[in-house]
Amino acid sequence: MQFLSKFLTLSGALLWGALGLHAQDTPASLPPLEEQTISEDMSLKALRLVQTYMDTVQSLEATFYQRAPDGGVVSGKLSMARPGRVRFDYEDDVPFLVVADGKTLNFVDYEIGQVTRWPVKDTPLRALLGASTDLASIGANIEMAPFGNEGLVALHATDVDRPEMGQITVYFEEVPEEAEKLRLVSWVVTDAQGQITTVELADAQVNADLNADLWDFEDPRGLAKRRRTR
């Protein structure tokens, strides 16, 4: 899928996928009741935390660092507003822009004067940009303390009916000074070919007042090489 081979070959920082989880053998019997209850309690807590985040955080601004499957790293400014709006402003020497207006995600190539579009709902980013907390609709699985990292919560999402969309895992961390609160720290996208792209956020400001013109862009089609303007 072009979205995953072009946009996601630009690139953040923590390559969570490189940690390499391995499947365990299926146990011959159920775990003791106490252990099972603790696991269920953690899952319910993780679900509650993510739902609270989705309900309370409606917009965000941050610096992003993106790592492509080939190891290349780029950075820039991320602006995001739910539902469906996002803008990746890459550093000045990267002639690309990614912006969504609520319905359509646009990959803008100012070097060759081309715009490629996808419905937001048909991209992995819908797990971050959805209007509701209906996590079941994105095939979500929420995990507490992935890789044994206490205080980390992972939201794994995929569409079993459209595997070509790829898979996304969104990572949140608990805010120590504020109970029952998460902050978004990174996400990992794996495309249908197993290529991994990661994005890490820094200096995030939540519920920022964002200008409506962030979701617009200068269309370069039919023009010679041009650089984007805000």
Image (tube, rainbow, N blue to C red):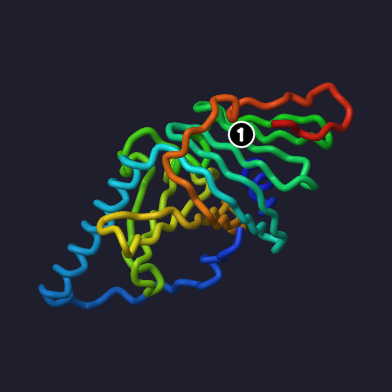
Q: Is residue 2 left or right of residue 205?
A: right
Residue at position x 29%, y 58% from top? 178
Of the pair 33 and 179, the residue shown nearer to us: 179
Q: Is residue 148 above or below residue 64?
A: below
**Quarter containing the N terminus:** top right
**Quarter containing the C terminus:** top right
Q: Is residue 98 left or right of residue 85?
A: right
In the rendered image, residue 108, in percent from the top left (x then y), is placed at: 71, 34
Q: Which residue is denoted by mark 1 in the rendering?
A: 99
- How many dots with numbers? 1
Amino acid tagged 1? Val
Residue at position x 67%, y 57% from top? 68
Q: Is residue 28 above or below residue 105?
A: below
Helix, strand or loop for disc 1 = strand
Of the pair 207 and 172, the residue shown nearer to us: 207
Q: Within the image, what quadrant is residue 142 found in?
A: bottom left
